[in-house]
Amino acid sequence: MFNRLFGSSRPTVAVIRLEGAISSNGPRSGLSDHALAPQIEKAFRRGKPAAVALAINCPGGSAAQSSLISARIRRLSEEKKVPVFAFCEDVAASGGYWLACSADEIFVDDTSMVGSIGVIAASFGLNEFIARHGIERRVHTAGESKSLLDPFRPEQPEDVARLDTWLHQLHEAFIAHVKARRGTKLADEDLFTGNIWIGRAAIEKGLADGVGHLVSEMKRRFGEKTRFRTYGPKRGLMARLGVAAVDSALAGIENRLAFSRFGL
């Protein structure tokens, strides 16, 4: 009766699951700020959580979505004065590590793959294929850069130079975020080459703070009676009824391809 009237004294840790590739396509293709926003807001605002724990298993994805999700977590952490802890599972790489850096402390398993602080762009060149099959490409544009990096045209040096500039700008934003969040913990400058570190090697480089697992670490800090509430993106009604089966299959393929880069 006392607990119902005045609330329980047991501390609560809100757990946000960040699993899958990061994409602006929303729930179908993984993580996005739009899809995660309601759950992140609830995690910080429901009751008075002792902490928010991020359970991360993410191979990366959209730089913009990574930045937006991370910014939302930081804003709410500062507004609500709630500490944030990240727990990396199989992989927290590229955008996944961007998300991890939104935490005040980062923990890994001995086998977690962490880092990949870099930016990548990949495509195909099909101009010789269509020429060999007698296919004529017809494109009409207003604006000289409108058909930039068209895969059905031969690659142009000026297009490649422009793409390199964009990738460099995104990389600099990623580096600035990691430096701002990790500060003097970082070991040296060779961290930003896109390389991956595993478990304790990531700790030695300053990319993580220790080996630790979510439940045991949170109970160690907040007590054995700590409760956990888990939040994550909700599936819509149509998806729950199985109407979005094709989209779900495509999302599974996209995620498998993203994780396969790390042998997972």
Image (cartoon, helix red, strand yellow):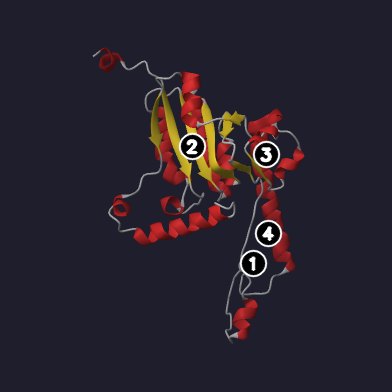
Q: Nearer the viewer, residue 89 or 206?
A: 89
Please name the amino acid that badge 1 sits on: Leu
Residue carrying label 2: 55
Amino acid type of the residue that numbered disc 2 sits on in the rendered structure? Ala
Which of these two is toward me, 38 or 100?
100
Q: Earlier in the sequence, mark 4 or mark 3?
A: 4
Label 1, secondary structure: give it. loop
Residue identified by numbered label 4: 163
Residue 12 position, x and y percent, is 40, 24
* Circle 3 SS class: helix
| Mark 1 to mark 2 CA distance (whole Å) | 37 Å
Q: Earlier in the sequence, mark 1 or mark 4?
A: 1
Q: Secondary structure at mark 4?
A: helix
Task: Determine contact: label 4, label 3, CB under 8 Å.
Answer: no
Q: Residue at x 76, y 36 (%)?
A: 188
Q: Label 1: which residue?
A: 149
Label 2 SS:
strand
Q: Quadrant of residue 95?
A: top right
- In this view, which residue lies farthest toward the bottom? 134
Can residue 80 be seen here? no
Tag 1 near tag 4, CB within 8 Å = yes
Q: Quadrant of residue 109?
A: top right
- Looking at the image, is mark 2 or mark 3 nearer the viewer? 2
